[in-house]
Image (cartoon, rainbow, N blue to C red):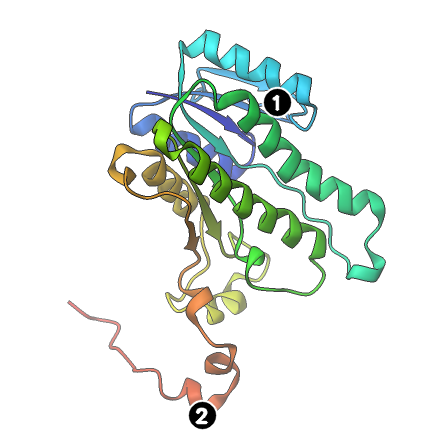
């Protein structure tokens, strides 16, 4: 089994590569920054928002691996500014890092792909947070692109899905975790395991979906955590459960 992973130098990218390798994939990684992690059969430093470089990386992956079963898209940029303060460069940076990379790689890979595309999206594509218009728009576009691929290429045996992480790490984990029903924020491994599942034959009847990997964040009403009277209704489970 083989995979091409874009965004492979990030903590999430490395966790995805490790999960795929554990499941038997040989992985070619690619990204803006160099990476010498031995989990990769080969790693290419490249700006994948450039269509020509994307085609070159896909050709290298096909030559190195002898074919491609899985494409994983895990690139992003997150400029922070309200809509009226977002610059042209911030807007286009976010779109290039997510949508241009995804489109370029899918266009080059789909004629050769044998199983699945899995994209790393975000809960910000369907849950709004202040200051993230460019990032949210890019991730929302990624959801739509994967649904389109799922529809058009399903009969060819190719599935396309998105994992949508909530907060992965963070500077104030203790306070941030209060809004998550599972009581913690996420880890790169949480994302990696979800991607590996959707990339695997075990998910052969799942396509066109956006799977929240968010510890229940997207099911919780903010009022449940902001109103003391509602917070008091949560059951108190003894910590020494067996």
Disc 2 is placed on an element classified as helix
Foreground residue among 79 and 232? 79
- Give how far across and how far down residue 24 sits, in percent: 29, 23
- Tell me: 45 left or right of 84: left
Give the quarter of the figure containing the N terminus. Answer: top left
Foreground residue among 28 and 52? 52
Give the quadrant of residue 193: top left
- Give how far across and how far down residue 75 sits, in percent: 59, 37
Q: Give the label on residue 34, or none.
A: 1
Q: Measured along the vertical axis of the image, is residue 123 above or below residue 232?
A: above
Count up the numbered dots: 2
At 64% across and 54% down in the image, what residue appears? 136
Q: Measured along the vertical axis of the image, is residue 233 above or below residue 112?
A: below
Q: Measured along the vertical axis of the image, is residue 97 above or below residue 4?
A: below
- Give how far across and how far down residue 57 sits, in percent: 57, 16
Give the quarter of the figure containing the C terminus. Answer: bottom left
- Give how far across and how far down residue 225 sits, in percent: 48, 79
- Of the two numbered discs 1 and 2 on the same chain, state the one appearing first in sequence: 1
At 78% across and 60% down in the image, what residue appears? 83
At 52% across and 38% down in the image, what residue appears? 11
Q: Which residue is mark 2?
A: 229
- Tell me: 236 left or right of 92: left
Question: Would you say the residues marked 1 and 2 are in contact, meaning their CB atoms lie under 8 Å apart?
Answer: no
Disc 1 is placed on an element classified as loop
């Amino acid at each position: 089994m083989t995979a091409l992973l874009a965004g492979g130098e990030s903590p999430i990218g490395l966790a995805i590569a490790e999960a795929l390798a554990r499941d038997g994939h040989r992985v070619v990684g690619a990204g803006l920054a160099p990476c010498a992690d031995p989990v990769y059969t080969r790693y290419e430093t490249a700006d994948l928002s450039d269509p020509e470089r994307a085609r070159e990386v896909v050709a290298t992956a096909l030559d190195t691996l002898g074919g491609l079963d899985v494409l994983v898209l895990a690139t992003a940029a997150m400029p922070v500014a309200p809509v009226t303060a977002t610059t042209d460069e911030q807007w286009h940076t976010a779109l290039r890092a997510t949508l241009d990379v995804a489109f370029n790689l899918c266009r080059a890979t789909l004629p050769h792909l044998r199983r699945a595309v899995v994209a790393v999206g975000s809960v910000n594509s369907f849950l709004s947070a202040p200051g993230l218009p460019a990032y949210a728009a890019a991730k929302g576009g990624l959801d739509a692109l994967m649904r389109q691929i799922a529809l058009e290429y399903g009969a060819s045996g190719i599935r396309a899905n998105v994992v949508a992480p909530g907060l992965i790490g963070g500077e104030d984990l203790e306070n941030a975790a209060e809004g998550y029903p599972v009581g913690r924020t996420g880890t790169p491994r949480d994302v990696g395991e979800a991607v590996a599942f959707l990339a695997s034959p075990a998910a052969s009847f799942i396509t066109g979906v956006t799977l929240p990997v968010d510890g229940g964040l997207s099911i919780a009403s903010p009022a449940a955590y902001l109103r003391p009277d509602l917070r008091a209704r949560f059951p108190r489970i003894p910590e020494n459960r067996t």
